[in-house]
């Protein structure tokens, strides 16, 4: 299908825009900054906590404040990108993120740090959907789109591990404050480059009035959901506030769906999520992230606490996973995306990642890095890279240009919510398994070295118990990808600009 068939008369042909590859550099840089930020602060947290006098009970807010603002406001951010223009939203998000990072780096109290992290989340919620939707509207040629999303997918998947390395270096050799200040050059370069290079195609704005009830219900519903899982991790699943948050979340999100089905200009047009392809992608991607988030957490603790690795060495230990993700995304995903249906990349990708996870269920206190962790990480990286790349491309393909921001926001929302669920759920499983192991084995350990060994064995037992769940979750993600994504024989559908185009039929990833 020619590109001219894909756009309304008078729109700028994205395939003719010489700047689109330059634009990809700045979009990818911004995405790297956002993904880095998810893990870089984790490594700096102990030092920051000590410096600012943050109590153990409150330290989780350094992570939670960011997750709540980011996860809760993503749909709103995506809609703002469709309304104001993606380039404008993208640049504003970058400038705001840089300012919030400067505030975090200069924090003198815990409250100032929590506020800075919440602001980072707010501007991240503007930035992330705008970045993905810019790619969606600028790259419409199937082969070029495959390459662009391959690069983007590799960064989205591997950036977290790069964050661990960078966070380790900055914390060990400079100061924890640099884990915030490092965002500023990223943001300034990306914003300046985007301002001068990006040419957003015309005719893709959604100028409908903002759906205020939808904004309020979705934001409160997502915040309640994310906070419920965060609270469950620290206070338990039976805690009154935890249960109340889950109930409130269900009520608010059901009310949101009801409102969206009735208002004239919804925040989230239900056609975006009820499409079988996209619904399957959002669900399988969210599940895969649940499994992956737990892994990052457990392996970081395993390497540092059980094996005694330094933060920098821990970061480097994750490099094979990054290499696997880049290979899976740019070599396997990109080359095959225009040749085979997305489900035949996503399903096997999640299964290969699940196989890597299965290897990690064999972890012991003295497991060999080369014999066990290295192959497991390579499989995880390859699988995730192969699956992420078509998922990100197909999730925004075939939507009306005026819905591109909201469709992109849904990809980010499934990742953020998946991350919050994964951290809480798998942590809880690991903690209870560790506690019961100690209870069963501590009586036989009389000397102190034996007791320490039991404690370490209990930790590893907890990690492997949770990793078994992650294996099952990845298996379920693969099943959903096989069942829902690219259902039936793909047939080409033109993507049109303008107001009246309905988007009910899946768009293929098969080149014609």
Image (tube, grey):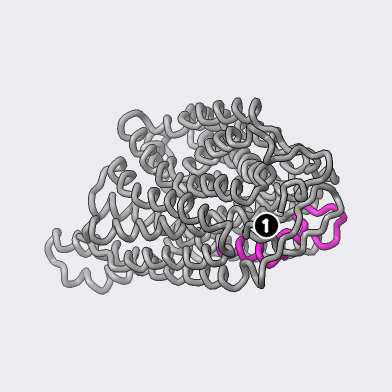
Residue 75, above or below 339: above
What percent of the width, then of the height, locates residue 269?
77, 57
Q: State the residue in front, 163 or 4.
A: 4
Disc 1 packing (10 Å; few <14; some 14–19; many ≥20): many
Image quarter (top left, top right, bottom left or bottom right) of the N terminus = bottom right
Camera sees residue 108? no
Residue 138 within the segment the image draws in magenta: no
Q: State the residue in front, 58 or 502.
A: 502
What percent of the width, then of the height, locates residue 214?
77, 53
Residue at image location 44% in from the left, 47% down from the top = 158
Instruction: Considering the whole magenta stretch, tell me its main secondary structure.
Output: helix
Residue placed under numbered mark 1 in the picture: 221
Q: Residue 133's image quarter?
A: top right
- Kindly state the secondary structure of the residue where label 1 is placed: helix
Residue at image location 74% in from the left, 59% down from the top = 493
Q: Is residue 417 left or right of residue 368?
A: right
Q: Is residue 4 left or right of residue 98?
A: right
Residue 271 within the segment the image draws in magenta: yes
Image quarter (top left, top right, bottom left or bottom right) of the C terminus = bottom right
Q: How many marks?
A: 1
Residue at image location 57% in from the left, 45% down from the top = 148
Q: State the residue in front, 14 or 252.
A: 14
Residue at image location 43% in from the left, 34% down from the top = 179
What percent of the width, then of the height, locates residue 390?
56, 57
What percent of the width, then of the height, locates residue 110?
48, 36
Magenta stretch in the rendered image: 260-284
Q: Is residue 265 left or right of residue 512?
A: right
Q: Is residue 344 left or right of residue 173?
A: right
Residue 178, above or below 229: above
Camera sees residue 77? yes
């Amino acid at each position: 299908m020619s590109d001219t068939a894909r756009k309304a008369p008078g729109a700028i042909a994205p395939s003719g825009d010489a700047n689109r590859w330059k634009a990809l550099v700045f979009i990818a840089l911004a995405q790297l900054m956002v993904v880095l930020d998810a893990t870089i602060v984790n490594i700096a947290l102990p030092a920051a906590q000590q410096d600012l006098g943050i109590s153990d009970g409150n330290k989780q807010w350094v992570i939670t404040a960011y997750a709540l603002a980011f996860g809760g406001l993503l749909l709103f951010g995506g809609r703002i990108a469709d309304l104001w223009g993606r380039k404008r939203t993208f640049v504003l998000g970058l400038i705001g993120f840089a300012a919030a990072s400067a505030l975090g780096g200069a924090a003198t109290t815990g409250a100032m740090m929590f506020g800075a992290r919440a602001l980072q989340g707010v501007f991240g919620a503007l930035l992330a959907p705008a970045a993905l939707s810019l790619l969606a509207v600028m790259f419409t040629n199937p082969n070029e789109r495959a390459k662009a999303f391959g690069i983007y997918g590799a960064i989205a998947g591997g950036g977290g591990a790069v964050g661990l390395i960078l966070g380790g270096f900055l914390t060990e050799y400079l100061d924890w404050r640099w884990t915030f200040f490092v965002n500023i050059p990223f943001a300034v370069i990306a914003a300046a480059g985007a301002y001068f290079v990006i040419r957003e195609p015309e005719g893709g704005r959604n100028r409908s009035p903002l759906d205020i009830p939808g904004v309020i219900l979705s934001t409160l519903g997502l915040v309640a959901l994310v906070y419920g899982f965060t609270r469950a991790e620290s206070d338990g699943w039976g805690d009154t506030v935890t249960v109340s948050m889950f109930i409130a979340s269900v009520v608010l999100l059901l009310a949101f769906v009801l409102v969206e089905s009735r208002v004239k200009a919804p925040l989230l047009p239900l056609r975006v999520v009820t499409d079988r392809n996209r619904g399957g992608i959002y669900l399988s991607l969210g599940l895969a992230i649940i499994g992956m988030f737990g892994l990052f957490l457990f392996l970081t603790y395993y390497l540092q606490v059980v094996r005694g690795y330094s933060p920098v060495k821990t970061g480097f230990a994750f490099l094979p996973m990054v290499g696997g993700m880049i290979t899976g995304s740019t070599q396997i995903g990109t080359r095959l995306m225009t040749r085979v249906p997305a489900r035949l990349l996503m399903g096997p990708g999640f299964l290969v990642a699940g196989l890597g996870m299965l290897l990690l269920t064999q972890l012991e206190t003295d497991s060999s890095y080369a014999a066990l962790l290295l192959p497991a990480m390579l499989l995880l990286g390859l699988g995730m890279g192969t699956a992420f790349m078509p998922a990100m491309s197909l999730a925004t393909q075939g939507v009306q240009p005026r819905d591109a921001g909201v469709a992109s926001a849904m990809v980010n929302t499934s990742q953020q919510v998946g991350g919050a669920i994964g951290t809480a759920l798998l942590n809880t499983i690991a903690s209870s398994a560790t506690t019961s192991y100690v209870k069963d084995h501590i009586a036989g350990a009389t000397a102190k070295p034996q007791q320490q060994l039991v404690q370490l064995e209990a930790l590893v037992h907890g990690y492997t118990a949770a990793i078994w769940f992650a294996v099952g979750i990845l298996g379920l993600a693969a099943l959903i990808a096989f069942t829902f994504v690219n259902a039936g024989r793909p047939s080409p559908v033109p993507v049109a600009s303008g107001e009246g185009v309905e988007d009910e039929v899946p768009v293929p990833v098969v080149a014609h």
